[in-house]
Amino acid sequence: SDVCSSDLTGNIKAQDILLTGLEKLEYRGYDSAGIAYFKENGKISIRKTAGKVKDLRAICDDNDATCGIGHTRWATHGGVTNANAHPHKSGSVSLIHNGIIENYHELATTYELEDRLISETDTEVAAALFDKFYDGKNPIEAIKEVIPLLKGSFAFCIMFENRPGVIYAVRNVSPMVAATSKEGSFIASDLTAFIEYSKRYFIVPEYAILTMEADKIDLQDLNGNTIEPEFLEVDWDMTAAQKEGYPTFMLKEINEQPAAINRTIMPRIKDGLPSFEEDGIPDSFFADCSDITIVACGTAMYAGMVGKTLMQDILGIPVTVAIASEFRYERPVITDKSVVIVVSQSGETIDTLEALRLAKTKTNKTLSIVNVKGSSIARESNYVLYTHAGPEIAVASTKAYTVQAAAFYLLTCKLALVQNAMSEADARAFISNLENVSDNIAEVLKLSDKVEQLTKRMLNASHTFFIGRGSDYTLSMEGALKLKEISYIHAEAYAAGELKHGTIALISEGVPVIALATQSHVYNKVISNIREVKARGAYVILLSMDEKITDATICDTHISLPKVPEQFAVFEAVVILQMIAYFTSTGKGLNADQPRNLAKSVTVE
Ligand code: AGP
């Protein structure tokens, strides 16, 4: 099960810090929650329930415990039940877990654990295993014996009965950060849980065993050698991870896009031209690049598709976009001259991380576009281009998409210059247009009331289509995903020219179709395709840079986008699609920040 844990052993009462920390991490997974803490007598007490952290709070009683662990779950093994919620307790051991123990069935059989198990989870098997190897004297020895038996990804926080005040931790692939402060020591899946106590933290090295006490954290490797942590400083403050007056994180993050884009592009523009000096990416990285493969998941992949359209158009070299979870099994064609760009907001998506690892066996030219400093993907790629969107809390990615797209625009311009596919004068004009993007988005954000109004007609839809050609088609994919994941309305992106080859059979009276027509070279063709769906009763919302379209045979509603160079229309158009999804979700009374079944960072395969 994917977990967001916040653990503390300190000098002050732990329970409220744990529960508040879990609320800050809840966006990462929120179908059940629990805490465990040491009582005065060294015994461990557990409170856990299906539901949200607020439901957990309701079953917690006041106590003076100063050491505990907490967990919110995104179910992978076993349903959403109280029994499957973490922490899991087996004998002397109580623990929480982020990841998947792939061989948990064999372990349960081999070590005869079945009769001790009361849940359906891989995590409880791990707890029973640690307890089986624990001799009552040395927890670290038990951990050293169990870890090599496990296959899969994990981040454990473990408490052993009668060892009050001490938390042990160990990870492989799944994320874990730690810090000490005057209030005590902290471990978490994501530093938003403890940033208000310490901005100085370290990433827990894989297979390092942590022994955490109130005033210190010791690290040792599986051979017992001491490991010194490498401390980092957080480059944003707690308010960045709060709503600051917005009703939801998602609306805040939609509105943060102008600033997020400026923070991301300005440090990479020197004298009007793209520069990656500060990122440590040499021009040689761009020089001998024969082809490009972009690998990601979800919205990050759709940002990659925007990058592909642009790069292939300007560079004239093959650019492929691969779904990370497919890339690993499709025998990708990568040579040592191939550039592989992996895109990930969290930098922890396992599918993408494993795809990166495969790519690195074939080329050293791997570059990651990542929004979280020091994350696994950032650390493992040969080069990293950090986006500076600030923490993205809403599960539905918005500002991360636009800053990722902006990163692709910068990279494309640099590649074009290095490969003589663009003159310096054209590059300056290109960069100048990119610098205007934040203003273009600011203009479009003023249309939010109009967008909210037109979504009223969508609230009861069962199916919606997003259609376009070229970059508008890639935009349609992101628009469809946004709507699906927060409004639960089935949505499909379709190449406008492809509809007539079958799918138009699904168009009937009132079916909403969001059409995009920002690209003049295919404008007339798209308008014809739109007329085809309009003629069959669709409710058409058209996004284009036309001043006004009143022809009722084309659309029911026209959204006029600010007139910008077509290559840059993607940024303003996607904001409309984000707002369509957002207002449809809120119009249906849904929680746009924490949609059902989802988690912010998918750290399981
Ligand atoms: C996007 O709105 C979704 N939350 C999801 O598709 C997300 O983009 C995907 O899981 C990739 O996450 P990452 O960017 O953190 O790798």
Image (spheres, rainbow, N blue to C red):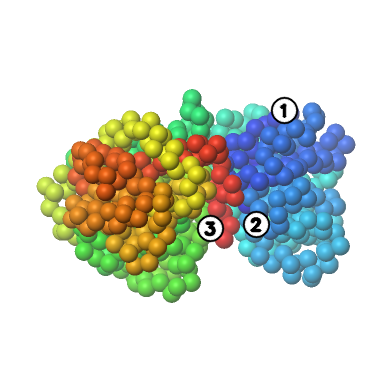
Given residues 455 and 63, the one toward you in this image is 455
Q: Amino acid at mark 3?
A: Ile
Residue 226 seen by the camera: no
Mark number displayed over residue 368: none
Q: How far apart are the two marked residues, 1 and 2, measured between alpha carbons?
A: 34 Å
Q: Which residue is mark 3?
A: 350
Q: How far apart are the two marked residues, 3 and 2, measured between alpha carbons?
A: 14 Å
Q: Amino acid at mark 1?
A: Ile
Q: Position of residue 374 (x, y in %)?
A: 48, 47
Tell me the residue at 27%/67% (across/down). 318
Residue 604: name its quadrant. Answer: bottom right
Of tags 3 and 1, the one toward the viewer is 3
Q: Quadrant of the C terminus?
A: bottom right
Residue 494 seen by the camera: yes
* Residue 471 in the figure: left or right of residue 392: left
Q: Label 3: few (<14), some or many (≥20) within 10 Å?
A: many
Tell me the residue at 74%/49% (across/down). 81
Look at the picture and state if 96 lies above or below 469. above
Q: Tell whether label 2 touches label 3 (CB within 8 Å).
A: no
Of tags 1 and 2, the one toward the viewer is 2
Quick one: label 1 or label 2, which is nearer the N terminus? 1
Tell me the residue at 68%/64% (across/down). 150
Q: Amino acid at mark 2?
A: Thr
Q: Which residue is mark 1?
A: 12
Q: Position of residue 299 (x, y in %)?
A: 43, 51
Q: Which residue is mark 2?
A: 76
Question: Which structural element holds mark 1?
Answer: loop
* Residue 221 in the figure: left or right of residue 368: right
Q: How far apart are the two marked residues, 3 and 1, measured between alpha carbons?
A: 35 Å
